[in-house]
Amino acid sequence: MDQVVVTEGLTKDYGAVLALDGLTVQVAPGVTGLVGANGAGKSTLIKILLGLIPPTAGRARVLGHDIATEGPQIRAAVGYLPEHDCLPPDVSASDFAVHMAMMSGLPRVAARERAADVLRHVGLAEERYRPMGGYSTGMKQKAKLAQALVHDPKLVFLDEPTNGLDPAARDEMLGLIRRIGHDFGISIIVTSHLLGELERVSDQVVVLDGGRLLRASRTDDFLDATGALLLEVLGDDAQARMLDALTRAGLTAARRGSMLTVDASHPAGVQDGGADADVHDVVRDTAGALGLGLVRLQADHRRIEDVFADTSGPR
Ligand SMILES: Nc1ncnc2c1ncn2[C@@H]1O[C@H](COP(=O)(O)OP(=O)(O)OP(=O)(O)O)[C@@H](O)[C@H]1O
């Protein structure tokens, strides 16, 4: 399928602040995590893609529509959950969702049905008839999510939907995002400043840093095995003795917190071919010879934070 978002050299200059710096990126259908530290340019990118603010330079297409000339077509096909609190406090979630559905062109009866469906889907039950000013943060985020979905969009932008939520509400929101994306086939671009948070729900991840693209790839590629083993030993001075012994055995090992990592891809002094198995054996035998308990030995997987830390050095 075609890309849902394509940008070329997208730049936004707020006077003294360069929020986007020549961003060129393509986003495929599915659930996409747009991650980056506070101020990386995530909200600015979404607002430009929605046509709410113009870019200083560059071009972009959303669902094939040009942001410069086809704003109304984009907004008809796209839903948006803004980052900040923007709900009218005296209005109920039910009335608000009906209003937003009618604004999108649905007749009143259809708007009522659609609003009821979508509110049930996000998990707002009886409280949907109460004024939103009395809602918890989690309920407000659900109401914001409902209005973003009420006109049956093809793509939704969710700007920090887990911001301010406690761990249980955050898990619930992440579960909802996964279901909306996978069960309903709506493409989702969801932002977070917590780099690891979207690993579980995203098909692909776009990492911004200082308004520039740091990396865009499928989540699986981010989390590929590193070719290293992660191990933990117990016993007196266990970590230091094990590190020393592994190094003397010709392996490249290093500390990581209370654990050790061992390079299993090209181990020095260990024959190629079946190298992984050999390294497992060397680790097991070394721990045995030292009389240390080997409590963990597993393939090491990268996390999004690691990729970010590796590539975002000083510029
Ligand atoms: N209207 C504005 N006027 C001036 N500077 C702005 C404006 N909006 C954003 N900025 C600045 O542009 C940069 C990018 O902001 P943006 O909100 O896009 O980042 P973000 O990645 O969404 O971060 P956050 O999660 O904190 O919202 C920041 O340095 C911010 O202070």
Image (spheres, rainbow, N blue to C red):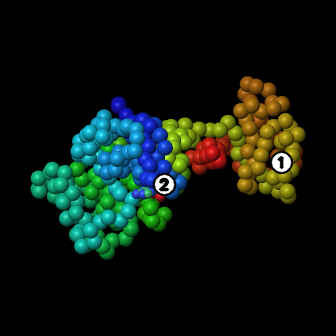
Residue 266 vs 53, above or below: the answer is above
Q: Nearer the viewer, mark 2 or mark 1?
A: 2
Residue 224 vs 270, above or below: the answer is below
Q: Can residue 109 be seen from the camera position used here?
A: yes
- Which of the pair 255/294 is nearer the observer? 255
Sooner in the amino-acid sequence: mark 2 or mark 1: 2
Residue occupying the point 22% across, 60% down: 97
Label 2 CB-ligand 1 distance < 8 A: yes
Label 1 CB-ligand 1 distance < 8 A: no
Residue occupying the point 18% across, 60% down: 99
Residue 293: x percent and y percent?
79, 52
Q: Which mark is residue 226?
A: none
Per the image, the residue denoted by label 1 is 242
Q: Amino acid at mark 2?
A: Ala
Per the image, the residue denoted by label 2 is 16
Q: Secondary structure at mark 1?
A: helix
- Which of the pair 10/199 is nearer the observer? 10
- Which of the pair 209/141 is nearer the observer? 209
Q: Can residue 175 be seen from the camera position used here?
A: no
Picture quadrant where residue 165 is located:
bottom left
CB atoms of marks 2 and 1 within 8 Å: no
Quick one: label 1, few (<14), some, or many (20+) residues within 10 Å? many
Residue occupying the point 48% across, 63% down: 167
Quick one: label 2, few (<14), some, or many (20+) residues within 10 Å? few
Residue 246: x percent and y percent?
83, 42
Residue 85: x percent and y percent?
35, 65
Q: Quadrant of the N terminus?
A: top left
